[in-house]
Image (tube, rainbow, N blue to C red):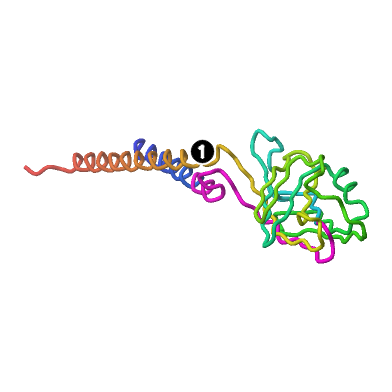
């Protein structure tokens, strides 16, 4: 009986580890990276799209500690774009008088955001020549670093020549460096425990059968 209970306990532990590893591997993959869609942002008449107030999820709390994970913003577009990350005050000062779309209250859990049209008629200086960006990228598929704990940050999307009409698809990349390794380790540990549990349960079954056989009356 004790051997059987041990086998059941080990099997449940193995199943838990195996299932947990499978879930982590499904979400983050072997490279430890999860890709969260934000959506398509665009402006037909504006010269920029400004994104701020990112919220990865309103339902699931995440540790606000850059040691746990890294965030990046990926932007894809059919035309080359400039993507720059900067403090909110500096980026909005740069766009003073420039027509642009302000995208706020981005929530990945509901795939919603608010978009406000900011009017203007000024043509801004070339974005690539500005010194205040903390990270920049140029092209039709760009990735820029996003601070985990600093909410006073903006992502500015523009055409490389600051012309009107900006269109891009935005993703948040969440990278947990140890997730892939941990998931694979959990899968292996869970599989090993399941094998051990099967062996223990077989031994428990055989021991029970032997005891039952020994208790049977023997013929004379």
What segment carries the magenta color?
Answer: 21-48
Q: Which residue corresponds to the image point at 56% horizontal and 43% vertical from the top-left? A: 32
Looking at this rendering, what residue extends furthest in the top direction?
67
Q: Nearer the viewer, residue 104 or 64?
A: 104
Mark 1 highlights which residue?
A: 182
Q: How many marks?
A: 1
On the picture, is 178 further left or further right than 98? left
Q: Which residue corresponds to the image point at 62% horizontal and 51% vertical from the top-left? A: 35
Dividing the image into 4 quarters, which one contains the C terminus?
A: top left
On the picture, is 32 further left or further right than 42? left
Q: Nearer the viewer, residue 179 or 200?
A: 179
How far across and down, in percent of the image, does residue 98 sit?
Answer: 90, 56
Q: Is residue 37 magenta?
A: yes
In this view, 162 is above or below 218? below
Dividing the image into 4 quarters, which one contains the N terminus?
A: top left
For the residue labelled by badge 1, is the local secondary structure a helix, a strand or a loop?
Answer: helix
> In terms of image quadrants, where is residue 146?
top right
Q: Which residue corresponds to the image point at 46% horizontal and 38% vertical from the top-left? A: 185
How far across and down, in percent of the image, does residue 94 sit?
Answer: 88, 47
């Amino acid at each position: 009986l004790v051997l059987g209970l041990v086998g059941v306990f080990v099997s449940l532990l193995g199943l838990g580890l195996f299932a947990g590893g499978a879930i982590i591997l499904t979400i983050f993959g072997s490279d430890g990276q999860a890709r969260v869609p934000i959506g398509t942002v665009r402006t037909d008449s504006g010269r920029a799209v400004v994104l701020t107030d990112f919220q990865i999820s309103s339902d699931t709390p995440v540790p606000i500690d850059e040691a746990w994970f890294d965030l990046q913003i990926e932007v894809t577009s059919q035309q080359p774009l400039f993507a720059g990350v900067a403090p909110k005050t500096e980026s909005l000062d740069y766009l003073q008088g420039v027509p642009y779309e302000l995208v706020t209250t981005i929530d990945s859990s509901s795939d919603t955001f608010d978009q406000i049209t900011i009017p203007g008629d000024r043509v801004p200086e070339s974005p690539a020549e500005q010194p205040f960006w903390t990270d920049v990228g140029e092209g039709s598929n760009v990735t820029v670093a996003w601070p985990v704990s600093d909410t006073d940050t903006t992502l500015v999307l523009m055409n490389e020549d600051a012309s009107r009409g900006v269109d891009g698809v935005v993703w948040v990349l969440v990278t947990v460096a140890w997730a892939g390794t941990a998931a694979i380790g959990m899968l292996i540990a869970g599989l090993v425990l399941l094998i051990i549990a099967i062996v223990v349960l077989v031994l428990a079954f055989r021991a029970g059968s032997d005891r039952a056989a020994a208790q049977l009356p023997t013929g004379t």
